[in-house]
Each structure stands twice: as C-alpha cells, then as structure tokens.
Amino acid sequence: MNDKNNKDYKTISEVAKILNLIDKKTGKVSTHTLRFWEKEFKEIKPYIFAGNRRYYDEKSIEIIKKIKFLLKNKGMTIKGVKKQLKSDNSKLDEFNNKTINKSILKTKLNNISNLLKKLKSNG
C-alpha cells in the first residue's frame, strides 16, 4: 500500500462522488456505473492495491469525466464514445511522435493519390 501514498489516488467511492453518480432510489453514491465503464473502456485503468480495492489517479479520473460527459451530456452511445476515445488517442500519438507522424502522413498521402488515380481512370 506504500505506492498509494506516492501519488494522489482516489477510491472508487470518491470518484463516484466527484462525478455525482448517485443512485436515485437510495440517494447513495453509486459505484456500479464506474465498474461497468471500466469493463467497457480499456482507457480506464484503476490501480488495484491490497484488498482488491480500486484506486484512480488524476489521468484516469479525467478520462472517466470525459466518458461521462460524452455519454450523459452529449447522448453518445458506448460504441460512439469508444470511437471518440480511439480517435483522440491516435491524434495524440501522431502529435507526440513526429518521426512516426511523417511516415504515417507519407503513406496516407500515397494511398490517397493512388485512390484518386483509380477514380480518374474508372470515371
């Protein structure tokens, strides 16, 4: 449990409170939604310490906030949110790695050029 003290982790109940996930019938904090999202979205990676308790760091909490916003405020489906998160991650990967970015862009441009040539020859 020493690792928990090195970083600012929140328990699943604390995260549910932050997100205002309240069971309408009981008025108590609802953690089952977070457990469900954890199964659906690989981007949510809680740390499991002694006693199998989940702890979330700030990065995970930000991802969960985004998921909640897209699902609840924007009315997106789980499938739609997965696509959005995947798209966001690939944009970040390309942005952060300029050497890969150049080769990816070159390949994409070549593919587009080839498609345009095919379309013109078929038309």
Image (cartoon, rainbow, N blue to C red):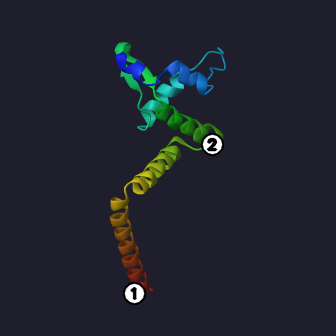
Looking at the rendered structure, the secondary structure element under dot 2 is loop
Q: Position of residue 114 (x, y in %)?
A: 36, 78
Q: Residue type at mark 1?
A: Ser
Quadrant (top left, top right, bottom left, bottom right) of the C terminus: bottom left
Q: Residue type at mark 2?
A: Gly
Give the spatial CA distance, label 1 vs label 2: 43 Å
Q: Residue at x 55, y 20 (%)?
A: 14
Relative to 61, residue 90 above or below: below
Quadrant (top left, top right, bottom left, bottom right) of the N terminus: top left
Q: Residue at x 52, y 41 (%)?
A: 78
Kindly identify which numbered label has been placed on residue 75: 2
Kindly identify which numbered label has been placed on residue 121: 1
Q: Nearer the viewer, residue 83 or 1?
A: 1
Looking at the rendered structure, the secondary structure element under dot 1 is helix
Residue 108 falls in which quadrant of the image?
Answer: bottom left
Q: Is 36 on the left or on the right of 69, as rendered? A: left
Q: Earlier in the sequence, mark 1 or mark 2?
A: 2
Q: Residue at x 64, y 14 (%)?
A: 26
Q: Position of residue 58 (x, y in %)?
A: 49, 31
Q: Position of residue 23 (x, y in %)?
A: 62, 20
Q: Residue at x 62, y 42 (%)?
A: 75
Relative to 97, residue 67 above or below: above
Q: Are marks 1 and 2 in contact (CB under 8 Å)?
A: no
Please rate how many residues cluster around mark 2, counting C-alpha atoms within 10 Å: few if below 14, some from 14 to 19, many from 20. Answer: few
Q: Position of residue 46 (x, y in %)?
A: 42, 27
Q: Is 15 on the left or on the right of 121, as rendered? A: right
Please rate how many residues cluster around mark 1, counting C-alpha atoms within 10 Å: few if below 14, some from 14 to 19, many from 20. Answer: few
